[in-house]
């Protein structure tokens, strides 16, 4: 498997990439400077060799030296200088070769030690770049840590970055402005939920009471059926409003938490829904290997269990089963019912999204699993579902 350098660079942290960029830039600049120095040194020494003049000293005839004046030699030492004797040629050629050897040795030593120095200073530049990148990114790290701590429960906190009016300071100010808008939005939502809880439920309660009192028995023929229809519509409207308010509350997150015994809550929910299960001829059973305790909101967790079990009973068939299992930190609710296509499962967790009219029947508003998902997310987890075999649905919630 061949490694792509671009893919490898993208996988590196920004600080490491910045330090690597410092080191690479220093290495390339140093290599260019070293190449220039070596070429300049070679050119300069070559010119000096060409300018060398060798003076021969007087010596007895036939000795190693003879008198005379010698022209500069060829750099390769192949051409004898004009006007010299054989002894003079040997002397000039020997000196020329010596100078060339000294030149090559000096250049090799300079090149070697310069390369060693360049590598060492490149390593130091990388370490210095790592330190400088850390110093430059310290405000970003502080902004990230503060952002992590900010949630819907402490939107009043701000980054409040100090320092010069630079790009980072303007980024922090923009983020603080966004938090201001979010805080106002959340406060508006909280006020709406608190007011709607009273304003919407009270008229429905008054309407139900008026129907029960104003249309009390005995009634003329035909009005009894109308009364039951009106009361059924009233109860359905109350259930819808309760579900919407519950969804809005779970979307806000958890305000207070306490330890909840989910095993005991599941058995209590199964007992409360036993009349509905008996009427639909569905068998409900709760199994638990050990008590499952969860830190969360007891009311929201109770609604999570209620919606899961009620949906499993409602979307079932006569003689079907509902199994609630609590194993470790996992809650699983399985039912037997009509087959559910795997590609339609994500739709079941959306508000007011129904699979088919047959699945929904005459009751339900398509909010059950949407509420389950919202409550699960409020508790730091998620609800997943998969088709059962041969039919039905299995919903799983894994608590941290």
Image: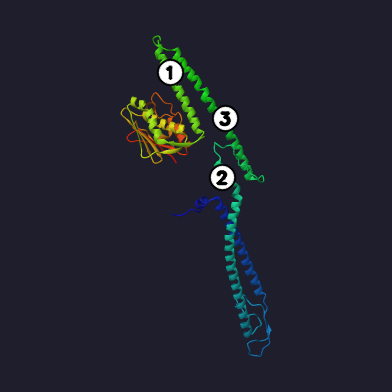
The residue at which mark 2 appears reads as 145
Q: Name the secondary structure under disc 2.
A: helix
- Badge 2 crowding class, 10 Å Cα cut-off, few under 14, some 14 to 19, many 20 or more, is few
- Badge 3 crowding class, 10 Å Cα cut-off, few under 14, some 14 to 19, many 20 or more, is few
Is residue 179 shown above or below 74?
Answer: above
Residue 396 image position (x, y, % from top left): 40, 37
Which label's residue is closer to the chain start, 3 or 1?
Answer: 3
Q: Which residue lies at the image location 46% right of the left edge and 17% below the top edge?
A: 209
Q: Mark number for residue 231?
A: 1
Q: Quadrant of the C terminus?
A: top left
Q: Distance between the residues labelled 3 and 1?
A: 33 Å
Q: In which quarter of the image is the N terminus?
A: bottom left
Q: Distance between the residues labelled 3 and 2?
A: 27 Å
Q: Name the secondary structure under disc 3.
A: helix
Q: Mark number for residue 121?
A: none
Q: Which residue lies at the image location 43% right of the left edge and 18% below the top edge?
A: 231
The residue at which mark 3 appears reads as 188
Q: Name the secondary structure under disc 1.
A: helix
Residue 71 image position (x, y, % from top left): 67, 79
Tally of marks: 3
Residue 95 image position (x, y, % from top left): 62, 79
């Amino acid at each position: 498997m061949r490694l792509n350098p671009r893919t490898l660079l993208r996988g590196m942290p920004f600080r490491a990439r910045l330090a690597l960029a410092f080191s690479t830039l220093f290495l390339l600049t140093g290599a260019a400077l070293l190449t220039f120095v070596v070429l300049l040194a070679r050119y300069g020494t070559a010119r000096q060799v060409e300018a060398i003049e060798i003076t021969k000293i007087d010596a007895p005839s036939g000795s190693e030296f003879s008198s005379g004046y010698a022209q500069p030699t060829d750099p390769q030492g192949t051409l004898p200088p004009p006007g010299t004797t054989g002894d003079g040629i040997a002397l000039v050629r020997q000196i020329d070769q010596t100078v060339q050897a000294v030149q090559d040795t000096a250049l090799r030593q300079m090149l070697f030690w310069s390369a060693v120095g360049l590598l060492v200073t490149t390593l130091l530049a990388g370490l210095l770049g790592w330190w400088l990148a850390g110093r430059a990114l310290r405000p970003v790290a502080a902004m990230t840590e503060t952002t992590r701590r900010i949630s819907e429960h402490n939107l009043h906190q701000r980054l409040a970055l100090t320092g010069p009016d630079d790009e980072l300071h303007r980024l922090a100010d923009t983020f603080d402005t966004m938090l201001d808008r979010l805080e106002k939005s959340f406060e508006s939502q909280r006020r709406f939920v608190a007011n709607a809880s009273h304003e919407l439920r009270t008229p429905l309660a008054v309407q139900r009471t008026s129907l029960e009192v104003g249309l009390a028995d005995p009634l003329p023929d035909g009005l009894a059926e109308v009364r039951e229809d009106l009361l059924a519509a009233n109860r359905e409207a109350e259930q819808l409003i309760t579900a919407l308010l519950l969804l809005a509350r779970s979307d806000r997150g958890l305000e207070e938490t306490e330890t909840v015994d989910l095993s005991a809550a599941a058995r209590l929910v199964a007992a409360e829904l036993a009349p509905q299960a008996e009427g639909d001829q569905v068998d409900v059973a709760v199994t638990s290997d050990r008590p499952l305790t969860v830190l969360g909101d007891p009311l929201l967790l109770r609604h999570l269990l209620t919606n899961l079990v009620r949906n499993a009973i409602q979307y079932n068939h006569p003689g079907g089963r509902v199994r609630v299992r609590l194993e470790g930190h996992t809650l699983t609710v399985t039912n037997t019912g009509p087959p559910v296509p795997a590609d339609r499962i994500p739709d079941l967790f959306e508000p007011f999204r129904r699979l088919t009219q047959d699945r929904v029947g005459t009751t339900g508003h398509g909010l059950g699993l949407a509420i389950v998902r919202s409550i699960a997310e409020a508790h730091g987890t998620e609800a997943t579902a998969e088709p059962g075999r041969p039919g039905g649905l299995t919903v799983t919630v894994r608590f941290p």
